[in-house]
Image (cartoon, rainbow, N blue to C red):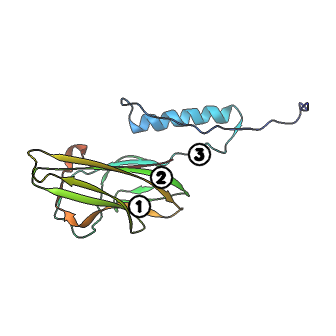
Amino acid sequence: MEEDDSTPVKAICPALLVAGSAHETPQQVVTRYNNYKAICNGMGFENLSCKDPIAFQSTLTKNLENMKNEETVIFDKVSLNEGNAYDKTSGIFTAPSDGIYSFSWTTLTPAGKHFITDIVRNGETITRNYTDGRGQNGYAMSTSNANIKMKKGEKVWIRTHGNNGHFVHGSGEWSFFSGVEL
């Protein structure tokens, strides 16, 4: 069947996967994504799959020790907050839309100390991170990841597991919390 020249042809923008390299900052990855998105839109693709990115990267600026039972760990230095979904004063990420979000957090603790944390969605534990420097001669570091299906307005944060927030190293950007919408 032949198309009439006066009828516009709609094309759907393909999903873009933009992965960063070890030499790119989070801001450079987002800039590259935005450039690809502009090209996609400029070529007349319908803006179905191309949407603004949601991503954050935050770190601790000070050591935390002897934290209370299930106390929120507030990663207070934000280097990236596309979509403004992470609140550095409360330490809480709020989903701006329904979707699947990928989170990662790392903690560093010195010899003789430990720091156990949970990632929680609306107060429900999803998974844990166990960093144990007891019996070590140097620092211990641990990273955990969680992919979480969220509805708009749901909240995710990192908290101590029970009373196990003994000590986390916060200077030098060793301990961090980050997330991105998939």
Residue on which the image places disc 1: 156
Establish if 25 lies above or below 99: above
Q: Is residue 176 visible?
A: no
| Displayed quadrant of residue 124 | bottom left
Do the CB atoms of the residues marked 1 and 3 lie less than 8 Å apart? Answer: no
Count of numbered marks: 3
Residue 166: x %, y % from top left = 16, 61
Residue on which the image places disc 3: 51
**Which comes before the other along the chain, label 2 or label 1?**
2
The Cα–Cα distance between marks 1 and 3, rounded to whole angstroms, is 22 Å
Residue 8: x %, y % from top left = 83, 36
| Residue at screen point 24% across, 70% down | 69
The Cα–Cα distance between marks 3 and 2, rounded to whole angstroms, is 14 Å
Task: Name which residue type carries label 3.
Answer: Lys
Q: In the image, is 98 to the left or to the right of 112? A: right
Dot 1: within a 10 Å radius of its alpha carbon, few (fewer than 14), some, or many (20 or more) residues? many
Q: In the image, is 135 to the left or to the right of 154? A: left
As helix, strand or loop, the secondary structure at mark 1 comes to strand
| Residue at screen point 17% across, 57% down | 114
| Displayed quadrant of residue 34 | top right
Residue 101 marker: 2
**Which comes before the other along the chain, label 3 or label 2?**
3
As helix, strand or loop, the secondary structure at mark 2 comes to strand
Residue 7 or residue 126, whichever sits in front: 126
